[in-house]
Image: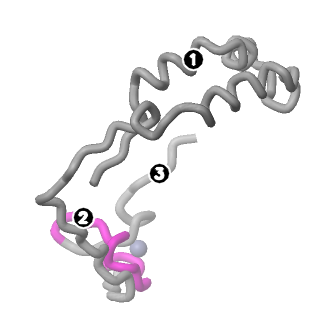
């Protein structure tokens, strides 16, 4: 089964005054309680079919993510790296820093 938020529900929810406050940058805790309650009560009253789009996925197979304990040695700095973080540079396994990856600031 796949559950997704129903777009019609999201659209209808967006019309509440609560989101007018949020768009103005007002923190949820600063919004008048009556405005928040109006939205919350409305959401609680909606039946599941309104909130969610539910699809049967008869062919879906859960695939377990491969164990993370296998490691490889970086060919440049020779430190061990968990396999899922290994990158390949010039055909050799390398760690992320040695791959030349730089986090964008
Ligand atoms: Zn390295």
Mark 1 or mark 3, which is nearer to you?
A: 1
Compute the Cα span from label 1 to label 3.
38 Å
Nearest to the observer: residue 14 or residue 87: 14
Direction from residue 31 to residue 9 in the image, left or right:
left
Magenta highlight on residue 8: no
In the rendered view, tell whether residue 57 sits above or below residue 28: below
> Taking 15 as reference, is 62 left or right?
left
Camera-side residue of 56 and 71? 56
Residue 97: where, in percent of width, then height?
A: 45, 64
Going from N to C along the chain, the mark reached first, 1 or 2, is 1
Q: Quadrant of residue 32?
A: top right
Do the CB atoms of the residues marked 1 and 2 lie less than 8 Å apart?
no
Q: Position of residue 54 (x, y in %)?
A: 31, 43
| Residue identified by numbered label 2 | 89
| View quadrant of ligand 1 | bottom left
Give the colour scheme shown: one colour
Task: Say which element carries label 2.
Answer: strand
- Asked if one can make out residue 78 in the rendered structure from this viewpoint, the answer is no
Among the two numbered marks 3 and 2 on one chain, the one whose residue lies closer to the N terminus: 2
Q: Where in the figure is residue 90, as x and y percent of width and height?
A: 19, 65
Classify the position of the C terminus by image quarter: top right
Q: Nearer the viewer, residue 49 or 91?
A: 49
Query: 71 or 49: nearer the eye?
Result: 49
The magenta region covers 75-91
Coordinates of residue 81 in the picture (x, y in percent): 40, 80
Q: Is residue 61 left or right of residue 94?
A: left
Determine the image quadrant of residue 74.
Answer: bottom left
Q: Does the beta carbon of the residue at mark 3 sit less than 8 Å from ligand 1?
A: no
- Identify the residue at horizontal 27%, vertical 54% (top origin): 1
Does residue 63 appear left or right of residue 80 in this picture? left
Which label's residue is closer to the chain start, 1 or 3? Answer: 1
Task: In the rendered structure, find residue 14 and report the number of the disc placed on it.
Answer: 1
């Amino acid at each position: 089964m796949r559950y997704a938020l129903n777009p019609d529900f999201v659209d209808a929810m967006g019309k509440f005054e609560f989101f007018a406050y949020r768009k103005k940058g007002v923190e949820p805790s600063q919004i008048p309680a009556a405005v928040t309650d109006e939205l919350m009560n409305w959401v609680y009253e909606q039946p599941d079919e309104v909130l969610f789009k539910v699809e049967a996925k008869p062919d879906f197979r859960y695939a377990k993510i491969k164990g993370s304990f296998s490691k490889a040695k970086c060919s440049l700095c020779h430190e061990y790296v968990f396999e899922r973080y290994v990158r390949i540079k010039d055909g050799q396994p390398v760690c992320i820093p040695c791959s030349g990856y730089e986090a964008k600031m």
